[in-house]
Every structure is written in structure tokens, then in C-alpha cells.
Image (cartoon, rainbow, N blue to C red):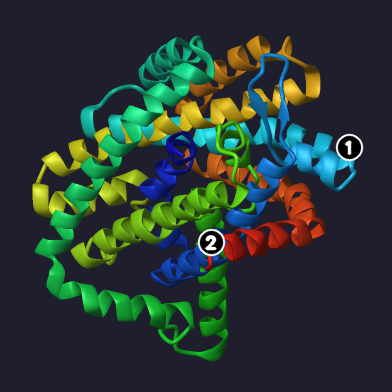
């Protein structure tokens, strides 16, 4: 669960939320909630299927993921291969270059560290972590995720306490903008609502990854034998990532007043400006450190997903090659512009979801049957 959370709790919770607000307005937050509501159902179903159709690898460890329930459950090796290929490609966007880009921006804006230096340092740390395989990845994420979540949430809750009088007006603004009540004329209202829906759903899916099938690969590797219990961990993962973490970041930005006077500032810099209203110059350092922790944990989680996808397609011999390419992409992502990196990540997200959602839809009866069995056995 910690490894899956490491992959989902990333820069989308800091930089992604700020980007959603600048592109879609406060209403985007509401549509993040809606995407998370349906996302929890998808996360449950796909992870139940992941446990049902997983297999033992040659090393005795469990292997699972959408490619296995697409091949063994849906009977479509083509869709299984398509998912694995898209997952391997997506790991370089959503799980790598976006994260490194946000780290580089945060450290450059706060401490003046050149993006290339950030990329090289991140690549070195990632290489050290990857050499230990899944065991080292899970050990690092098991320690890192609770610490970084408490660290960030502690600072964010304090900011919200300072700006507590603005919280109710902000929540009203979120709902009003979500349904187009703040845009005035009918045409503008429709456009504003469409932007809020598009950006809110995109950022919500980017953050919690529900429906992408990515987290199934690590959930299925666990020793648990009850599919529905693992599915519930996936539900918690989506809830904590989007309903809790993303909402807190959005409320910090909106309640602090920096959103109204952003003046073109977006991403991690906008979030840093919000924290700076309470912590002063230390606010930027706080956000930069949070970004480093969040993004590095996501790099670890997605490196595992990409390795599993590459192994499915080409066998174990492809894993060292994949690792070398993944580390190289860290440096590239740190030095690229923000906009094309986000566009690349959203494109890969959408393509990766298609075969997975086809599998979940085709195997929905198996997932529901498992839930009914579990509910009867536990008198739910």
C-alpha cells in the first residue's frame, strides 16, 4: 500500500492542483472530487481482478496487473500487450519527467539550484534505490510515505487554521464555479464549466491514477490472499490522495488569496506563494522540500510499474535496459518546459486507461461476485 501511495502521492498533489486551479478555476476542485468518487469504485474493481488473475513468477514472487487479467480473464493477449506497452511508456511521463520537472522548478525558484544539477542528483539517488529491486523500493517507501504525508499535512493544516475565516467562502466558490454560476453569460458559463470539468477530471486521474491499472501491479505483488481486502486498500489510496491531499492543497491556495493575484504564476510556485503567506520565506523552502519527497517517492513507485510492464513484454532481460532509460529520463525531464511535460503525461494517461477499462468492464461480473462473496462471509 505504501509503494502504491508513493506512486500516487506525488507532484500532482502540489504542482498539479495549482495547475488545475489556474487552468480550470476553483470549480476544478469539485470535479476532482467527482473523479475520485468514481475512481474509488474503479480502483476496487481493478485490484480485485489483479489478485484473482495474478501468477507466480520464476522467482516465486507474485506477478499481477491488468496485462494478466486482460490475457487470462478477458482472453485478449493483444489488449494485454497494448496495456504493458502503454504502461511502460507512461512511466516515463506521469511517473518520471513530470515529477523531475516539478522538483527542478521548485528547487530553482526557491534555492536557485540549476535544473541540470537537480536532474543529475535525482538520477544518482534513483540508481542507488533501483539496484536493490522491489525489496529496497518497498523498504524506502514504507519509511518515506508516512513521514512525507505527515510533514506536508502538518504545514498545510496550520495554514488553513490561520486562514480559517476564508474556508466557507472558498468552498461556496468551488461549488459555484463547478456548475458555471460565476461566469455570467450563458456561453461563458458553459465554457467555464467545461474547462473546470476537463481540467478537474484530468488532474484528479493524474493524481490518484484510478482506472489506469498502474497500482494493480504492486497491490498484486502482496502476500494477501483476500482480493476484496486488497481492493479496500486501493479505495483508501484514492481517497487519501485526492479527497484529502489534493483538497488540502487547493484550499491552502484559495484561502490564502494568492490565487486571485497569481499573475501567471502556476504549478509549485503558486503553492509556495500560498504557504509563504503564513511561513514567510520559509514557505517556499517547505514546498520545495515537500516536492522533493513526493516526487522521489513517485519515481520509485513508477519505476516498479515500468519494470513489470517491460518484463511482461520482453522478459527479465529487458529490466536492466528499462532502468537505464528510466534514469536517463530523469535528467531530460528536469530540463524540459512544464507545459509539454504535462501534455505528454495526460496523453499517456488516457491511452493507458483504454485497455484497462475494457478489461474492468468485461470482467465486472467477476469483481462483483467477489464482493458479494466477501460481504456475505463478513455479514456486511
Q: Position of residue 218 (x, y in %)?
A: 57, 34
> Which residue does the image show at 56% across and 22% down from the upper left?
329
Task: List the residue tagged with mark 1.
Answer: 77
Count neighbours of disc 2 (C-alpha within 10 A) and say few if under 14, some if 14 to 19, many if 20 or more: few
- Does dot 2 land on a helix, a strand or a loop? loop
Q: Earlier in the sequence, mark 1 or mark 2?
A: 1
**Are the residues at dot 1 and dot 2 in contact (C-beta closer than 8 Å)?**
no
Q: Position of residue 59 (x, y in %)?
A: 67, 14
Instruction: Say if 121 sits above or below 112 in the image.
Output: above
Residue 301 is left or right of residue 290, and the answer is right
Residue 68 is left or right of residue 183, and the answer is right
> Which residue does the image show at 73% across and 47% down from the upper left?
351
**Which of the two marks, 1 or 2, is nearer to us in this view?**
2
Q: Nearer the viewer, residue 20 or 3?
A: 3
Q: Position of residue 247 (x, y in %)?
A: 35, 61
Task: List the residue tagged with mark 2.
Answer: 378
Amino acid at each position: 500500500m505504501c509503494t502504491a501511495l508513493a506512486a500516487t502521492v506525488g507532484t500532482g498533489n502540489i504542482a498539479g492542483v495549482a495547475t488545475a486551479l489556474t487552468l480550470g478555476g476553483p470549480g476544478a476542485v469539485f470535479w476532482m472530487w467527482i473523479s475520485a468518487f468514481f475512481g474509488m469504485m474503479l480502483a476496487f474493481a481493478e485490484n480485485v481482478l489483479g489478485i484473482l488473475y495474478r501468477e507466480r513468477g520464476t522467482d516465486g514472487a507474485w506477478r499481477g496487473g491488468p496485462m494478466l487479467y486482460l490475457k487470462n480473464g478477458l482472453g485478449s493477449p493483444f489488449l494485454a500487450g497494448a496495456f504493458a506497452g502503454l504502461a511502460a511508456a507512461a512511466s516515463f511521463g506521469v511517473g518520471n519527467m513530470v515529477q523531475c520537472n516539478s522538483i527542478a522548478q521548485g528547487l530553482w525558484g526557491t534555492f536557485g539550484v540549476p535544473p541540470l544539477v537537480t536532474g543529475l542528483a535525482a538520477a544518482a539517488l534513483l540508481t542507488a534505490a533501483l539496484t536493490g529491486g522491489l525489496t529496497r523500493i518497498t523498504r524506502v517507501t514504507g519509511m518515506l510515505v508516512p513521514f512525507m504525508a505527515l510533514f506536508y499535512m502538518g504545514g498545510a493544516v496550520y495554514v488553513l487554521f490561520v486562514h480559517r475565516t476564508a474556508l466557507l467562502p472558498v468552498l461556496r466558490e468551488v461549488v459555484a464555479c463547478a456548475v458555471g454560476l460565476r461566469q455570467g453569460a450563458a456561453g461563458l458559463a458553459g465554457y467555464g464549466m467545461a474547462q473546470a470539468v476537463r481540467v478537474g477530471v484530468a488532474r484528479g486521474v493524474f493524481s490518484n491514477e484510478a482506472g489506469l491499472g498502474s497500482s494493480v501491479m504492486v497491490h498484486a505483488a502482496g502476500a494477501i490472499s483476500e482480493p476484496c481486502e486488497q481492493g479496500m486498500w486501493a479505495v483508501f489510496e484514492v481517497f487519501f490522495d485526492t479527497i484529502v491531499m489534493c483538497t488540502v492543497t487547493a484550499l491552502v491556495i484559495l484561502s490564502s488569496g494568492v490565487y486571485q493575484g497569481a499573475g501567471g504564476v502556476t504549478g509549485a510556485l503558486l503553492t509556495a506563494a500560498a504557504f509563504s503567506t503564513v511561513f514567510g520565506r520559509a514557505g517556499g523552502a517547505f514546498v520545495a522540500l515537500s516536492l522533493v519527497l513526493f516526487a522521489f517517492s513517485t519515481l520509485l513507485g513508477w519505476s516498479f510499474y515500468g519494470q513489470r510492464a517491460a518484463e511482461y513484454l520482453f522478459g527479465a532481460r529487458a529490466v536492466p535496459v528499462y532502468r537505464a532509460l528510466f534514469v536517463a529520463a530523469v535528467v531530460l525531464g528536469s530540463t524540459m518546459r512544464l507545459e509539454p511535460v504535462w501534455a505528454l503525461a495526460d496523453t499517456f494517461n488516457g491511452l493507458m486507461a483504454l485497455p484497462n477499462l475494457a478489461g474492468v468492464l468485461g470482467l465486472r461480473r467477476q469483481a462483483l461476485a467477489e464482493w458479494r462473496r466477501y460481504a456475505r462471509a463478513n455479514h456486511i
